[in-house]
């Protein structure tokens, strides 16, 4: 299909880089008018210029509720509507050596950016959509919000809360024909993993990231790395009429990791000609 979002207006928070950028590019390619919200001005302006006249960069600190409201108002003022709201912006909490060394100093900041922004973005976009025929709200969580694990507990808690909030909002806003869904990416190479390792020099940071990526690869059934484009395809589905009867779901995009651990294949267990494992 082509131009699935022709005439639609979308906002993507954290849209200047990583997964957000992938979503912006996919939406623009499908004909959407896109507002890119981010604090990375240079990257955001460059992406808006690249995407053409139907894209606008708006500097937005999503941890500030007032700026979220201004973002929604800007989209409506500039493009005359708001059909799709993608609450994607997020940050990681620092990776420390165990829970006992966690001082939780980043708690307020991580919760503001990761959770408060999603709640405020859903609320403010929903207010407009409720009076204008409905719409689609897509919240970005993480595999870390579904699957328990050690490290970055504040980040994991914030992403888990997004899952529950999304379902609650989906129930409440269905009356207004507003669909609220969640995507939970995992194993997607983006700068957010690097930001969790504070106080590391570049060489140690690269080794740390390589080790984490290798572990992720070993644990998932699909061995190729995911990409922002993979997440963007999921967002496109949830933004379009193809998902008009879908709300309140959590869609993992993570290569099958949460399905379970990969079983080691023994030598000689290749599939024989009759199709049955030997």
Image (cartoon, grey):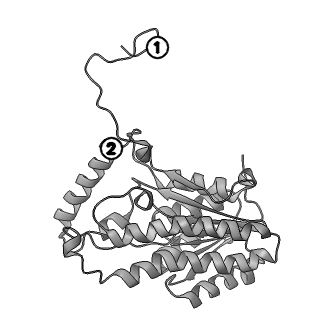
Residue at 45%, 67% (x, y): give it: 159
Q: Is residue 92 visible?
A: no
Q: Quadrant of residue 13?
A: bottom right
Query: On the image, numbered disc 1 is attached to which residue?
Result: 275
Query: On the image, numbered disc 2 is attached to which residue?
Result: 219
Residue 152 % position (x, y): 31, 68
Residue at 56%, 87% (x, y): give it: 65
Above or below for 108 versus 169: below
Check the picture and name the quadrant holding the C terminus: top left
Query: Crowding at label 2, few (<14), some or many (≥20) Cα neighbours within 10 Å?
Result: some
The front one of 195 and 169 is 169
Above or below for 53 versus 73: above
The front one of 124 and 8 is 124
Q: Tell me if 109 is positioned left or right of 133 in this view.
A: left
Q: Quadrant of residue 126?
A: bottom right
Residue at 78%, 78% (x, y): give it: 80
Residue at 24%, 73% (x, y): give it: 198
Q: Quadrant of residue 82?
A: bottom right
């Amino acid at each position: 299909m082509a131009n699935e979002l022709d005439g639609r207006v979308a906002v993507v928070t954290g849209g200047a880089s990583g997964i957000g950028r992938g979503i912006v590019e996919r939406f623009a390619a499908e004909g959407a008018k896109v507002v890119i919200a981010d604090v990375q001005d240079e990257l955001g302006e460059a992406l808006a210029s690249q995407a053409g006249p139907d894209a606008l960069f708006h500097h937005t600190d999503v941890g500030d509720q007032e700026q979220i409201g201004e973002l929604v108002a800007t989209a409506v003022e500039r493009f005359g509507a708001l059909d799709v709201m993608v609450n994607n912006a997020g940050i990681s909490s620092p990776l420390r050596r165990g829970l006992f060394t966690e001082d939780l100093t980043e708690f307020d900041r991580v919760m503001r950016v990761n959770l408060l922004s999603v709640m405020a973005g859903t609320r403010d976009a929903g207010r407009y959509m409720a009076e204008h025929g409905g719409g689609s709200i897509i919240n970005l969580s993480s595999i870390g919000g579904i699957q328990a694990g050690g490290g970055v507990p504040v980040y994991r808690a914030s992403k888990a809360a997004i899952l529950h909030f999304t379902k609650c909002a989906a129930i409440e806003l269905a009356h207004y024909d507003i669909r609220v869904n969640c995507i939970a990416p995992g194993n997607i190479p983006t700068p957010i993993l690097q930001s969790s390792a504070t106080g590391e020099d570049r060489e140690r940071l690269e080794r740390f990231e390589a080790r984490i990526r290798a572990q992720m690869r070993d644990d998932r059934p699909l061995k190729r790395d995911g990409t922002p484009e993979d997440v963007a395809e999921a967002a496109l589905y949830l933004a379009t009429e193809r998902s008009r009867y879908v709300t309140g779901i959590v869609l993992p995009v993570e290569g099958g990791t949460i399905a379970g651990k990969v079983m080691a294949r023994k030598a000689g267990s290749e599939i024989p000609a009759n199709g049955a494992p030997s």
